[in-house]
């Protein structure tokens, strides 16, 4: 009997091990295969949450509400696989020789159990510290503009999003801040963006960066320039050069500068002539330096001035980009009628749909229902309506991806100074 019992127990243990191994190598993933089974799902979840958060903030700005970011800081997950085996004797009637105290058993019933657990812990960090807000409200620096123009994204899209003025030509400056109900002049800027894109696509002109000599000082007496000062300047990436107008020297540094380089064969083309005329640039030049001009550059149409030899750009902040895109949100009629959102008009006071400003760039639809329409790419619910980007709208999807990527670039190094929300998901 003992031999039978231990043999059964041994077989049961082997059966349990077989079940555990079969589970780990088939439908259930444990060990190294956990990464294969879960990485893509976590990635898709984080992507969806980020896109929904950006869309939600843009919709909130359309309703003059404060945008708030809650970013996924970390995901820590714990996997557990357990198996147990037990041999239970099957008792029959009491043994007559034991006075009814002991009972005998003639068989053993196996009891098997296999269990698994997945306990992720998600840490969310509010993006509302002082440094992040300051960067959110600060115009993008020249380095960011250089980076954007050197990517494969269309330059027309970059200019419509991140540029407030081109040599004073306005890009709907009243629409890149809190809702004022008026969208100022933007047609000339849109035409400029189209011309610049056309010129780049047809190799008539291109925006590029080149190493240029920048003078850091005025004339320096030759006696002041010694071997030691030359060496120190070289260590800092600078150099002394003799001046052409006398026995003096000039301190020079080579810097990457953004410029528009014009193809000599296209310098007299109708597109280049129209572009230089709209931006009030000197015609016939082979290149124009591009400089960041903080503040307000006057509109040349309202305040005429001599043509310029450089293109002065007034950049936008990320906050201004969000406000600008919020004009592309469809507003239900009942929300306009009850005053939840200001009605929009153009510079002449005529009623205007704000989506006309972002036409061909970004558009958010609104509809009612228990769930978003099947054609929705990303959707959020607000005030009883679903706001969504259509999956067939390639321009809006591309713009959403571009703004989201730049937001990650700008705020990728933020430090958590506020409360951290940790959500254990599992038990």
Image (tube, rainbow, N blue to C red):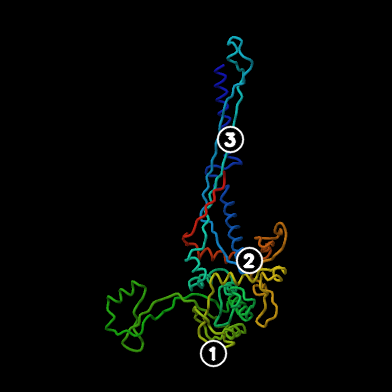
Coordinates of residue 186 in the picture (x, y in percent): 62, 79
Q: Report, in whole angstroms, how far the alpha carbon at label 2 lies from the one at label 1.
A: 40 Å
Report the front residue among 255 and 333.
Answer: 333
Q: Secondary structure at mark 2?
A: helix
Report the front residue among 233 and 324.
Answer: 324
Q: Nearer the viewer, mark 2 or mark 3?
A: 2
Coordinates of residue 141 in the picture (x, y in percent): 49, 72
Q: Which residue is mark 3?
A: 114
51 with respect to 256 (left or right): right
Instruction: Give the mark nearest the N terminus, 2 or 3.
Output: 2
* Residue at image coords 72%, 61%: 368
Quarter of the image where one finds residue 158: bottom right
Could you say which disc has been placed on residue 305 in the image? 1
Label 3 Cα neighbours within 10 Å, binned few <14 / some 14-19 / many ≥20:
some
Label 2 Cα neighbours within 10 Å, binned few <14 / some 14-19 / many ≥20:
many
> Can you say which quadrant of the picture contains the N terminus?
top right
Q: Secondary structure at mark 3?
A: strand
Q: Is residue 131 above or below residue 420?
A: below
Q: Are marks 2 and 3 in contact (CB under 8 Å)?
A: no
Q: Is residue 95 above or below residue 141?
A: above
Could you say which disc has been placed on residue 142 in the image? none
Q: Are marks 1 and 3 in contact (CB under 8 Å)?
A: no
Q: Which residue is mark 2?
A: 59
* Residue at image coords 56%, 34%: 83
Coordinates of residue 286 in the picture (x, y in percent): 52, 83
Instruction: Give the mark nearest the N terminus, 1 or 3.
Output: 3
Label 1 Cα neighbours within 10 Å, binned few <14 / some 14-19 / many ≥20:
few
Q: Is residue 206 above or below residue 335?
A: below
Q: Report, in whole angstroms, how far the alpha carbon at label 1 lies from the one at label 3.
A: 82 Å
> Can you say which quadrant of the picture contains the C terminus?
top right
Q: Report, in whole angstroms, how far the alpha carbon at label 2 lies from the one at label 3.
A: 48 Å
């Amino acid at each position: 009997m003992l031999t039978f019992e231990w043999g059964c127990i041994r077989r049961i243990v082997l059966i349990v091990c077989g079940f555990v191994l079969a589970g780990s190598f088939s439908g259930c993933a444990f060990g190294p295969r956990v990464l294969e089974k879960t990485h893509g799902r976590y990635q898709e979840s984080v992507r969806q949450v980020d896109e929904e958060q950006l869309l939600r903030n843009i919709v909130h700005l359309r309703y003059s509400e404060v945008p708030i970011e809650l970013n996924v800081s970390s995901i820590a997950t714990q996997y557990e696989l357990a198996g147990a085996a037990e041999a239970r004797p099957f008792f029959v009637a009491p043994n007559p020789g034991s006075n009814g105290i002991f009972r005998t058993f003639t068989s053993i019933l196996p009891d098997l159990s296999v269990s698994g657990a997945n306990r992720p812990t998600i840490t969310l960090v509010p993006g509302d510290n002082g440094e992040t807000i300051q960067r959110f409200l600060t115009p993008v620096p020249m380095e960011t503009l250089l980076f954007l123009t050197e990517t494969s994204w269309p330059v027309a899209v970059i200019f419509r999003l991140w540029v407030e003025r081109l040599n004073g030509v306005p890009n709907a400056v009243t629409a890149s801040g809190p809702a004022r109900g008026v969208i100022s002049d933007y047609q000339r800027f849109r035409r400029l963006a189209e011309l610049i894109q056309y010129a780049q696509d047809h190799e008539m002109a291109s925006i590029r960066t080149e190493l240029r000599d920048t003078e850091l000082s005025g004339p320096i007496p030759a006696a002041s320039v010694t071997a030691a000062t030359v060496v120190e300047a070289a260590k800092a990436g600078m150099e002394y050069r003799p001046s052409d107008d006398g026995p003096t020297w000039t301190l020079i540094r080579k810097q990457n500068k953004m410029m528009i380089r014009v193809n000599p064969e296209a310098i007299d083309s109708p597109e280049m002539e129209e572009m230089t005329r709209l931006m009030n640039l000197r015609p016939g030049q082979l290149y124009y330096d591009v400089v960041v001009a903080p503040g307000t550059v006057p509109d040349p149409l309202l305040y005429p001035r001599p043509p310029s030899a450089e293109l002065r750009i007034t950049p936008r902040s990320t906050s201004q980009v969000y406000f600008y895109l919020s004009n592309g949100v469809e507003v239900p009629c009942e929300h306009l009628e009850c005053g939840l959102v200001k009605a929009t008009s153009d510079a002449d006071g005529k009623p205007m749909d704000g989506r006309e400003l972002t036409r061909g760039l970004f558009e958010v639809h609104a509809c009612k229902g228990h769930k978003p329409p099947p054609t929705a790419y990303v959707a959020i619910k607000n005030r009883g309506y679903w706001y969504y980007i259509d999956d067939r709208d390639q321009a809006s999807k591309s713009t959403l991806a571009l703004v989201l990527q730049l937001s990650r670039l700008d705020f990728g190094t933020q430090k958590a100074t506020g409360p951290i929300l940790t959500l254990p998901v599992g038990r």
